[in-house]
Image (cartoon, rainbow, N blue to C red):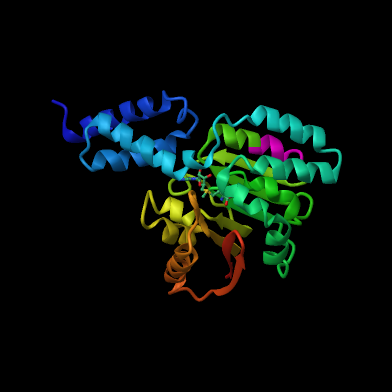
Amino acid sequence: MINDREALAGDLERLVAAVHSSAKYGRVCEDVVRGVGERELAKGRRLKDAVKATKKKLHQVGGAYLEAGMDYAAWLDDLRAASGNEGDFRRACAETMRHHSSTKERFQILDEFYATVLADLPPLHSVLDLACGLNPLAIPWMGLPDGAAYYAYDIYEDMVEFLQAFMELTPVRGQAAACDVLRSCPKPRVDLALVLKSVPCLEQIDKSAGAQLLDTIDADYLLVSFPVYSLGGRDKGMPTNYEARFRELVADKDWSIKRFEFAAELAFLVSR
Ligand SMILES: C[S@@+](CC[C@H](N)C(=O)[O-])C[C@H]1O[C@@H](n2cnc3c(N)ncnc32)[C@H](O)[C@@H]1O
């Protein structure tokens, strides 16, 4: 006789297969599908409803930021063609970032964002970019020394393959992988960790995500930021609410924190 646990495990396998069979979610790494799917099945949903709810959640946390038909091969061709000239390369990077709606918002503040936030830091030899989207395309603006290690993680296998190939065009030693930052991403000790605009998004999957991340990242400096726009446009209450959430997350920490407010992003640089 099949017990409840075995039935649930069988449903989870079927859910993962069903989600992966759709074009939109076929390249979302298995660990993330499993994590979200497990939570939906645990709510007592029927398989069909759990598949639907999993896709909806994956859309909210990832798919909603991507434009239709992400053409990684063509972008890589353009970046390779531009890589011989610094100005052309930066322009190609900035153009490419616009295909991810969250990274795109940084486009308008790119020249000031990293220059301002990282201005007083010592040379950064290692960077961890969690839930990175297309932010590694901003590497040319970060002022990293040649050979710095750059770890970039997101949920899409095709996106991280592209980022891996892209980083080979830059002076960093890049390592991009598809994984779930809440379950499986390696978190090597680094000089700087970036958690850019992803706490609200990850907290849609797991309410403890922000706290969990801040506790498990091993970095001298941590840059945590929040959007000032919703996907639908500017929202006046957002910065206030997100700042309150961030202050709550760090309330019991003995960390020094610098606040930066840009037109398109609210950022906190934490020194530990
Ligand atoms: C709001 S965007 C931020 C992107 C990037 N950090 C930036 O600021 O340009 C959130 C990103 O988190 C990724 N993501 C969502 N859930 C994730 C998870 N469990 N593990 C890793 N990445 C995740 C999404 O695919 C998306 O690219």
Residue 49 is left or right of residue 116, and the answer is left
Q: Residue furthest right?
A: 85
Considering the image in quadrants, where does the N terminus appear?
top left
Viewer can see residue 39: yes
Considering the image in quadrants, where does the C terminus appear?
bottom right
Residue stretch rendered in magenta on the structure: 163-170
Camera-nearest residue between 257 and 81: 81
Viewer can see residue 223: no
Q: Quadrant of residue 60?
A: top left
Camera-nearest residue between 21 and 192: 21
Q: Quadrant of residue 55?
A: top left
Compared to residue 252, the image places residue 139 above or below, namely above
Compared to residue 19, the image places residue 202 above or below, namely below
Compared to residue 39, the image places residue 12 above or below, namely above
Q: Residue 133's spot in the image, x, y percent?
A: 57, 44
Camera-nearest residue between 56 and 158: 56
Which residue does the image show at 54% across and 74% down from the upper left? 255
Q: Residue 135's spot in the image, x, y percent?
A: 63, 48
Which residue does the image show at 73% across and 57% down from the upper left? 111
Q: Residue 265's spot in the image, x, y percent?
A: 58, 60
Residue 239 is left or right of residue 143, and the answer is left
Q: How many marks?
A: 0
Q: Residue 110's spot in the image, x, y percent?
A: 70, 55
Asked if residue 167 lies in the magenta stretch, the reply is: yes
Asked if residue 264 lies in the magenta stretch, the reply is: no
